[in-house]
Amino acid sequence: MKIIAFDLGDVHTGIAQADELGLFATPRTSIATKDLINWVKETLQNEQLETIVIGLPKTLKGTQSQQTEKVLAYKQKLEELFPQINWILWDERLTSKEARTMKSKQIKKEKNKEHAIAAALILEGYLDFLRYKAKS
């Protein structure tokens, strides 16, 4: 069973996946957000997805913003369409900024990679949490 993560954006969504042991997160791809539901449908036909972690954009003070509300609404829509998946929200503060420092924005292709890198950073945080929880 796979664990993947989304860095939801208004235009693009970055996607990352965990390795089989749940130790590492790897950027997978970036797609147009308008195509995300179809991507999930197609992926479910070929892969067994157990959990999808969605980055939750909060302000630096930890409060909600307009983007937070958009992500919450989109997550609800995904949960209704795909109830067999365990949907997790994960604080994504500063992941996009960190992803930008890892990749230059010189060309559009590089910008799209940022979304996938941000998704991997979100997923790494979640995987770290799972490992810590297992040790407790």
Image (cartoon, helix red, strand yellow):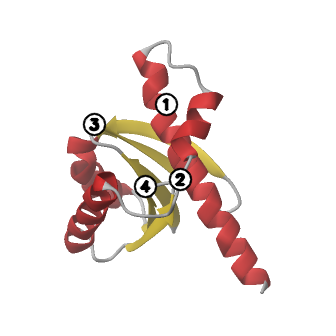
Of helix, strand and loop, which one carries label 3? loop
Disc 4 crowd rating (10 Å Cα; few below 14, some 14-19, many 20+) is many
Of helix, strand and loop, which one carries label 4? loop
Q: Which amino acid does label 2 sit on?
A: Arg
Is label 1 or label 3 in front?
Answer: 3
Question: Is residue 19 visible to the viewer in this orientation of the structure?
Answer: no
As measured in the structure, the alpha-carbon distance from the residue carrying label 4 to the one carrying label 3 is 15 Å
Disc 1 crowd rating (10 Å Cα; few below 14, some 14-19, many 20+) is many
Which residue is denoted by mark 4 in the rendering? Answer: 57
Of helix, strand and loop, which one carries label 2? loop
**Above or below, 8 relative to 117:** below
Asked whether the beta carbons under mark 4 and mark 2 sit within 8 Å of each other, the answer is: yes
Q: What residue type is labelled 3?
A: Val
| The C terminus, quarter of image | bottom right
Q: Earlier in the sequence, mark 4 or mark 3?
A: 3
Q: What residue type is labelled 1?
A: Lys
What residue appears at the point 22 percent right and 50 percent down from the top-left corner? Answer: 38
The percent position of residue 71, horizontal first and vertical second, equals 31, 58
